[in-house]
Image (cartoon, helix red, strand yellow):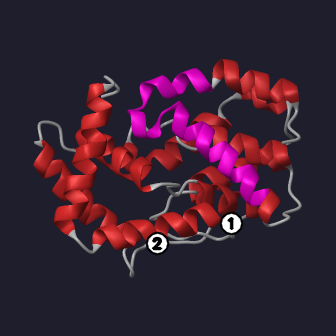
């Protein structure tokens, strides 16, 4: 990654700590994964892009998730656009590109991203493993359905992931990403058997609980 080191230091010091406010599935570990996957996509697809913009979009894309998960992409873009310190690193046109890419990253968006940067981060934001996916869906479900039992959360996860990643699912990706292709194959296979899906998710969640991560 060829990133402006002053930008990187600013984001690590001032932006990354904000992710402690999000639930674990959209916390800092997820953000770092999306950043790394974004640059992997850039390399694998030989994309000619401004790497500082890629980094900024990935770093800010979920920052407002704790405020309102249902429109977090809009809130996150607004938070980024109000950060006056970014004017030290980007001109006005670049800041518009970053804002639009954050707005466009969500899998359920009805339109395709307006720029290469939105397509990169939208692709990178898809899960890289079944374990990560099932953990994120559970913790997100806890936020949406407070008081729900584990069995209810597992049922909700199965239904949500079928809509998102099933054969006719709405999740889209725009660039070659071998890890995502492997994940999609594995999650679709698991979704063919609801009992096995629930058993697998329960094992992952029990492991998280044992480690006191949730």
Q: Nearer the viewer, residue 77 or 8?
A: 8
Q: Secondary structure at mark 2?
A: helix
* Residue 151 percent coordinates (x, y): 11, 49
Q: Can the viewer see residue 158? A: yes
Magenta stretch: helix, strand or loop mostly: helix
Instruction: Give the vertical position of 6 relative to 169 (above or below).
Output: above
Badge 2: residue crowd in 10 Å (few <14, some 14–19, many ≥20): few
Q: Secondary structure at mark 1?
A: loop
Q: Is 36 placed left or right of 156 in the picture? A: right
Q: Please name the residue that numbered disc 2 is placed on.
A: 185
Name the residue: 19% across, 53% down: 154
Of the numbered discs in the image, which one, if any, rests on residue 114? 1
- Depth check, mark 2 against mark 1: the one in front is 2
- Residue 126 part of the magenta-drawn span: no
Q: Is 54 placed left or right of 63 in the picture? A: right
Name the residue: 61% across, 46% down: 34
Query: Start and end of the magenta stretch?
Result: 16-42
Instruction: Give the vertical position of 74 relative to 23 (above or below).
Output: below
Q: CA distance from mark 2 to mark 1?
A: 28 Å
First in sequence: mark 2 vs mark 1:
1
- The residue positioned farthest toward the top in the image shown: 13
Name the residue: 26% across, 29% down: 209
- Residue 24 part of the magenta-drawn span: yes
What quarter of the picture does the C terminus occupy? top left
Q: Is 100 placed left or right of 153 in the picture? A: right
* Residue 115 percent coordinates (x, y): 73, 64
């Amino acid at each position: 990654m060829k990133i402006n080191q002053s930008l990187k230091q600013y984001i690590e010091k001032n932006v990354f700590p904000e992710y402690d406010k999000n639930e674990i599935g959209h916390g800092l570990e997820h953000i770092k994964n999306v950043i790394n996957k974004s640059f992997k996509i850039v390399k694998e697809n030989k994309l000619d892009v401004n790497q500082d913009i890629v980094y900024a979009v990935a770093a800010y894309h979920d920052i407002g998730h704790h405020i309102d998960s249902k429109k977090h992409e809009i809130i996150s873009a607004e938070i980024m656009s109000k950060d006056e310190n970014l004017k030290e690193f980007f001109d006005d046109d670049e800041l518009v590109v970053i804002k639009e890419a954050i707005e466009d990253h969500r899998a359920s968006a009805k339109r395709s991203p307006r720029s290469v940067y939105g397509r990169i981060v939208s692709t990178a934001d898809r899960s890289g493993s079944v374990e990560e996916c099932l953990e994120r869906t559970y913790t997100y479900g806890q936020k949406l359905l407070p008081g729900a039992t584990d069995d209810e959360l597992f049922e909700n996860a199965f239904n949500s992931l079928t809509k998102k990643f099933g054969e006719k699912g709405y999740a889209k990706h725009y660039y070659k990403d071998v890890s995502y292709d492997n994940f999609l194959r594995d999650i679709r296979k698991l979704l063919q058997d609801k009992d096995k899906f629930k058993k697998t998710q329960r094992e992952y969640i029990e492991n998280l609980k044992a480690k006191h991560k949730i």
